[in-house]
Image (cartoon, rainbow, N blue to C red):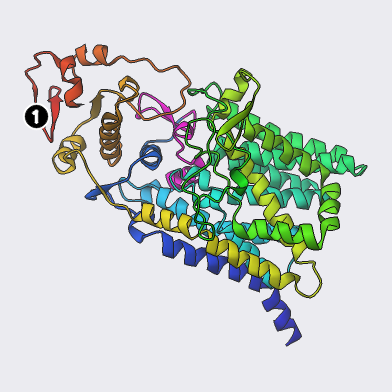
């Protein structure tokens, strides 16, 4: 009986975390979202449409090199630059023969990250030395209710916060018992983060790099070996960046526009327990969305408990993990940017940043690891309070869960949204499926900044084309290896290839001149090449 109880006690935290994740996934994500079918009468919109198009083309087209580049999509699109989540797209491509036409895993990814979030939190807490059931349930609930995570539902790759929890847990493991095997696993984690999203890779590398720094500040001789391990992780990421086509890509820049506001961690936007704030705090005029980092009522209450009941424990934790504290401080400064906002005002402007920092336009994201470090540290320290500690962590997790209700509702509403097509999908699908090549005019780079409706319709045409992975001339991208240039006039003037279909929006009709082979189709102008 004792052995049986011990076994149950060992697995109970994992079972509870898995149950929380599964229940949350089922409650928030409809089956038609997780496993969508082609030919639907509804569509996705926004960033997720870009992810869907990238994954569909990558899965459907033959293997090639560079590994992540799809020649049939926009003349050669690296799906990593379209946030196609290579970490999932690569195994799906290996299974392509078993998958239906037009398959993509963006819905599956959402379900996976929802399940993995509380599990990763429990693993991280165990690396901090806390293995009891009540604190595990509390931290699982709190991690699954982190506002900055739930709010990322419009951007699939950036919902991979479980990687940050794994990175934090890896740090704790590496400062306790560094080994070659542990650093090899950390290198694999770094690569997985890169194949999810480069922002996540930078954050994971910062957490791993804190391990040798902490050991150095502890005057632990193992810091040298750990420094080699951290360098190896960075080297693995650097090699992957070079070989998989990440390097050389640039976007519009704008470091500082989407920064962390100093009030954001304590500004209760979308809080159920403090429903007095209408939206995100913003000092830059860009809305404050990317800097949204409300920590949640449960986490902040736990930090207040520690400040009152165990201030010495907080100070001791900072001393023991000084390297991590420095790494998190550096990430916070990077998140704040060179234009520091406090409330609605910019209180410090350091002028133009170095060009390198323009790669991190949405700098407010870099505060995410700080939030998770505060969560795990708070749970581990509160759990040590005599008699009431474990139950208190559970209670704080419930408070965090209740407080996050508006963010859960927003995610559920978004996943259940069924937007109608603004183009005539029923009329266009047969023509696209029958084409050997598709030309869309205007192409993405030729749409003016104010052309929101035009971008929406071009995005819809890309979604329809991706159902059959028909080679297409354009793609929605925010980063490019070669600066984009509008060549629609030259494209329209060139002779049509055999079995080529040109779909021209009315606003680009002037490019066609008096082409006789064109006719109306589904509200657009359709031109067919010979054959």
Which quadrant is the N terminus positioned in?
A: bottom right
The residue sitting at 31% across, 23% down in the picture is 447
Q: Quadrant of residue 244?
A: top right
The residue sitting at 55% across, 58% down in the picture is 145
User: Whole-percent x and y of residue 520?
Assistant: 9, 29
Left or right placement of residue 463 versus residue 240 in this view: left
Which quadrant is the C terminus positioned in?
A: top left
Magenta span has 76? yes
The residue sitting at 72% across, 41% down in the picture is 328
Q: Nearer the viewer, residue 415 or 84?
A: 415
Magenta span has 54? no
Q: Is residue 111 above or below residue 448?
A: below
User: Whole-percent x and y of residue 142?
Assistant: 60, 60
User: Whole-percent x and y of residue 116?
Assistant: 56, 57
Left or right placement of residue 142 versus residue 9 in this view: left
Q: Is residue 53 above or below residue 349?
A: below
Question: Is residue 141 in sight in this rendering?
Answer: no
Q: Which residues are magenta?
A: 65-94
The residue sitting at 85% across, 49% down in the picture is 320
Q: Residue furthest bottom?
A: 1
For label 1, the residue is 520
């Amino acid at each position: 009986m004792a052995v049986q109880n011990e076994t149950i006690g060992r697995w109970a935290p994992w079972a509870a975390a898995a149950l929380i994740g599964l229940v949350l996934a089922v409650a928030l994500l409809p089956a038609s979202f997780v496993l969508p079918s082609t030919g639907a009468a509804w569509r996705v919109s926004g960033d997720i449409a870009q992810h869907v198009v990238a994954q569909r083309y990558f899965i459907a087209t033959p293997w090639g090199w560079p590994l992540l580049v799809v020649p049939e999509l926009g003349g050669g699109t690296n799906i990593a630059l379209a946030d196609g989540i290579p970490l999932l797209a690569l195994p799906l491509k290996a299974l392509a023969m078993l998958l239906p036409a037009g398959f993509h895993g963006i819905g599956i990814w959402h379900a996976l990250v929802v399940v993995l979030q509380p599990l990763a939190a429990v693993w991280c807490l165990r690396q901090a030395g806390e293995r009891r059931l009540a604190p595990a349930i509390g931290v699982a609930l709190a991690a699954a209710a982190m506002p900055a995570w739930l709010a990322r539902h419009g951007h699939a790759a950036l919902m991979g916060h479980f990687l940050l929890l794994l990175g934090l847990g890896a740090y704790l493991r590496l400062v306790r018992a560094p080994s070659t095997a542990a650093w090899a696993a950390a290198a694999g984690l770094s690569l997985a983060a890169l194949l999810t999203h480069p922002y996540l890779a930078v954050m994971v590398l910062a957490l791993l790099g804190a391990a040798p720094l902490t050991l150095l500040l502890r005057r632990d001789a193992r810091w040298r070996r750990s420094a080699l391990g951290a360098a190896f992780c960075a080297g693995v990421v650097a090699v992957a960046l070079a070989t998989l086509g990440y390097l050389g890509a640039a976007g519009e820049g704008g470091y500082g526009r989407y920064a962390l506001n100093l009030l954001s961690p304590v500004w209760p936007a979308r809080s159920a327990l403090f429903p007095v704030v209408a939206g995100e705090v913003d000092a830059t005029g860009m809305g404050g969305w990317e800097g949204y980092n409300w920590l949640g009522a449960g986490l902040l209450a736990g930090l207040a408990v520690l400040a009152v009941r165990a201030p010495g424990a907080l100070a001791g934790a900072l001393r023991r993990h000084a390297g991590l504290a420095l790494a998190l401080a550096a990430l916070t400064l990077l998140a704040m940017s060179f234009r520091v906002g406090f409330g609605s005002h910019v209180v410090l402007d350091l002028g133009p940043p170095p060009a390198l920092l323009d790669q991190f336009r949405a700098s407010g994201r870099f505060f995410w690891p700080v939030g998770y470090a505060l969560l795990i540290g708070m749970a581990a320290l509160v759990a040590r309070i005599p008699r009431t500690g474990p139950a208190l962590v559970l209670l704080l997790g419930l408070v965090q869960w209740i407080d996050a209700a508006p963010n859960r509702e927003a995610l559920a509403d978004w996943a259940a949204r069924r937007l109608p097509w603004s183009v005539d999908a029923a009329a266009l699908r047969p023509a696209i499926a029958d084409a050997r090549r598709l030309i869309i005019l205007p192409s993405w780079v030729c749409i003016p900044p104010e052309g929101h409706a035009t971008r929406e319709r071009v995005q819809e045409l890309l979604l329809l084309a991706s159902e059959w992975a028909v080679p297409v001339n354009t793609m929605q991208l925010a980063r490019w290896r070669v600066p984009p240039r509008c060549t629609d006039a030259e494209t329209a003037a060139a002779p049509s290839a055999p079995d080529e279909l040109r779909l021209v929006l009315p606003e680009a009709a002037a490019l066609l001149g008096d082409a006789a082979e064109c006719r109306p189709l589904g509200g657009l102008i359709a031109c067919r090449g010979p054959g």
